[in-house]
Amino acid sequence: MYDRYNRRINYLRISVTDRCNLRCIYCMPAEGVHLLGHGDILSLEEILEVINEAVILGVTKVRITGGEPLVRKGIVSLIDRISKIKGIKDLGLTTNGILLPLFAKDLASAGLHRINISLDTLDPEKYRTITRGGDIQNVLDGIEAAKNAGLFPVKINCVVRNSSDEPDAQAVREFCQQNGLEARFIHEMNLADGRFTIVENGHGGDCVNCNRLRLTANGMIRPCLFSDIEFSTRELGIRKALEQAVGKKPEKGSVNLNGNFHNIGG
């Protein structure tokens, strides 16, 4: 698939749930969020139908996100079924790492290729503040579990306020260098203000070369994180939703006034 700007669209990011076991300050407001009803969230079968159709149209890369994808019931089975779809060359997952000690080995056995784990600081108190109560040791155990399961490369997503030269980011960088991990630095974004930059050591935020679509937990295809444009797979049908999203994909991101990181997938 190619969009109006001759970008090849071959990457589908899939939010499998809007639920999470953390409440990070840059992702969720302090008062919490209105969660989707279970009937609104795509079933595993519906997700697989979207992926199969997307592969026919040229998608070769899939990343599973949330919310926190590991809280979604049946996540290992979903990974197993996606891995068996002919044409998928890159299957990844982004997680906060909390549940990886329970799932890493099974995810690797199911066919997951690689994993990204969120870690913004190595200071236990700062981590507890950022995540509103999280225990950093659970993440460190999750990172170790991912390594032991052979989910290479293990990439660490570190959100920074202004710069990767910040002390917490530098500590994360050093930790990654010492432990065979790849560090990616994501400048804190704001959907409503349209504030984003290109990810350091990554590809997100690079509008000129953007190759992705997003499937939200409730079945909307979004061509851009920083846009309100979306197309319903349930109302339009999967093929038409995908094709219209590619056809309407903006040249660059602007603002998003009706979405949130926790249900779009970041």
Image: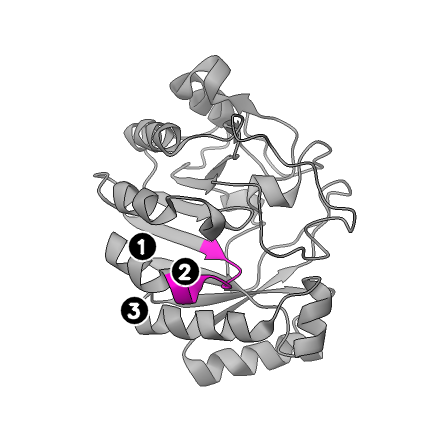
Residue at 65%, 71% (x, y): give it. Answer: 164
Q: Which residue is mark 3?
A: 150
Q: What residue is drawn where x is 63% and y is 68%?
A: 120
- Name the mark on residue 112: 1
Check the image and name the residue furthest to the bottom: 178
User: 10 Å neighbourhood of mark 1: few (<14), some, or many (≥20)?
Assistant: many
Q: Secondary structure at mark 2?
A: strand
Whole-number angstrom distance, CA of label 3 to CA of label 2: 10 Å
Q: Quadrant of residue 55?
A: top left
Mark 3 is surrounded, within 10 Å at the Cα level, by few (under 14), some (14 to 19) or many (20 or more) other residues, namely some
Q: Position of residue 80 (x, y in %)?
A: 27, 46
Q: How many marks?
A: 3
Q: Position of residue 204 (x, y in %)?
A: 54, 51
Q: Is residue 99 magenta?
A: yes
**Would residue 181 appear left or right of 168 to someone viewing this image?**
left
- Where residue 198 appears, as percent x and y from the top left, is 60, 55
Distance CA(mark 1)–CA(mark 3): 10 Å
Q: Which residue is mark 2?
A: 115
Q: Is residue 163 visible?
A: no
- At label 3, which amino acid type do we have? Gly
Asked which secondary structure carries label 1, the reply is loop
Q: Residue at x 57, y 63 (%)?
A: 200
Q: Quadrant of residue 113?
A: bottom left
Which residue is at a point 37% across and 67% down the rendered structure image? 153
Q: Give, as a three-letter code, the residue at label 1.
A: Leu
Q: Are marks 2 and 1 in contact (CB under 8 Å)?
A: yes
- Looking at the image, residue 253 lies above or below residue 153: above
Q: Residue furthest top?
A: 236
> Which residues fall within the magenta stretch?
94-102
Q: Quadrant of residue 118?
A: bottom right
Q: Residues within 10 Å of mark 2 (few under 14, many from 20)?
A: many
